[in-house]
């Protein structure tokens, strides 16, 4: 499987991002509460607090309560079209994938993720992740890609309507701390279609 790194600056107009934020504020679900952490004493470091045998500590939200809202099966035309268009782009890289999860995730002030590879099999082995940034009225919260020597080699500054797609099991990545404001992202995870 080839590695993917794709950025589209103006995938969606910023005015069309607002309904996703509104949905989150209306629904305010706790879909992934079991993997959400609110330990404000955690720090963004390359030395994991609880490492796995390979030194990775997984995709764990730290520093705030993110409360994702699942919208994978939306009947809303805007939501359905955005999900279909992101899926179409992802399938142009890997035709044998399917949408595993899609949801609006709120990152309040203080929230971050340490460097990790997405290797959770909670929904199936991930192949690609896609992030549609829904706002930019906050400080911090960049998606950053790391080397094994603790260096950031690629920095994605969120901007409303920007789309990022990448091989989330192949690239070491993290989210820098949201210093002020609230970051909203429409997150997608895609896995391989089981052909058995």
Image: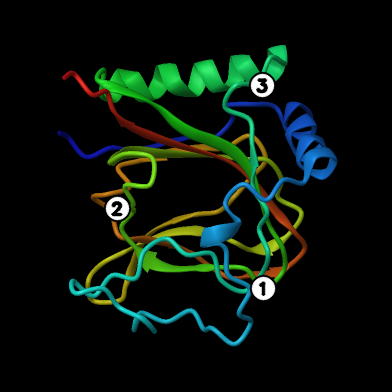
In depth, the one of 98 and 179 nearer the eye is 98
5, above or below 63, in the image: above
Local packing at callout 1 (Cα closer than 10 Å; few below 14, some 14-19, many 20+) is many
* Dot label at residue 110: 1
**Taking 163 as reference, is 120 left or right?**
left
- Alpha-carbon span between mark 3 and mark 2: 27 Å
Figure coloring: rainbow
**3D distance between C-alphas at marks 1 and 2:** 24 Å
Dot 3 alpha-carbon crowd within 10 angstroms: few under 14, some 14 to 19, many 20 or more: some
Q: Which quadrant would the C terminus be assigned to in this image?
A: top left
Res 89 → quadrant: top left
Q: Nearer the viewer, residue 57 or 152?
A: 57
Camera-near label (3 vs 2) is 2
Q: Which residue is mark 2?
A: 119
Mark 3 lies on residue: 79
Residue 68 spot, x, y in % from top left: 64, 48
């Amino acid at each position: 499987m080839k590695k993917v790194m794709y950025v589209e600056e103006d995938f969606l107009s910023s005015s069309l991002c607002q309904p996703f934020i509104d949905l989150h504020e209306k629904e305010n679900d706790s879909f992934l509460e079991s993997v959400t952490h609110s330990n404000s004493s955690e720090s963004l470091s390359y030395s994991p607090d609880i490492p796995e045998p390979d030194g990775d500590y997984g995709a764990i939200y730290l520093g705030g309560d993110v409360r994702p809202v699942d919208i994978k099966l939306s009947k809303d035309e805007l939501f359905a079209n955005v999900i279909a268009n992101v899926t179409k782009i992802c399938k142009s890289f890997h035709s044998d994938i399917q949408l595993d999860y899609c949801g609006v995730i709120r990152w309040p002030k203080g929230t971050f993720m340490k460097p990790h590879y997405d290797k959770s099999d909670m929904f199936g082995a991930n192949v690609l992740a896609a992030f549609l940034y829904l706002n930019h009225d906050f400080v911090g919260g960049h998606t950053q890609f790391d080397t094994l020597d603790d260096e950031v080699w690629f920095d994605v500054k969120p901007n409303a309507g920007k789309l990022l797609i990448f091989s989330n099991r192949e690239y070491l990545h993290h989210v820098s701390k949201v210093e002020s404001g609230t970051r909203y992202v429409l997150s997608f995870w895609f896995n391989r279609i089981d052909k058995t």
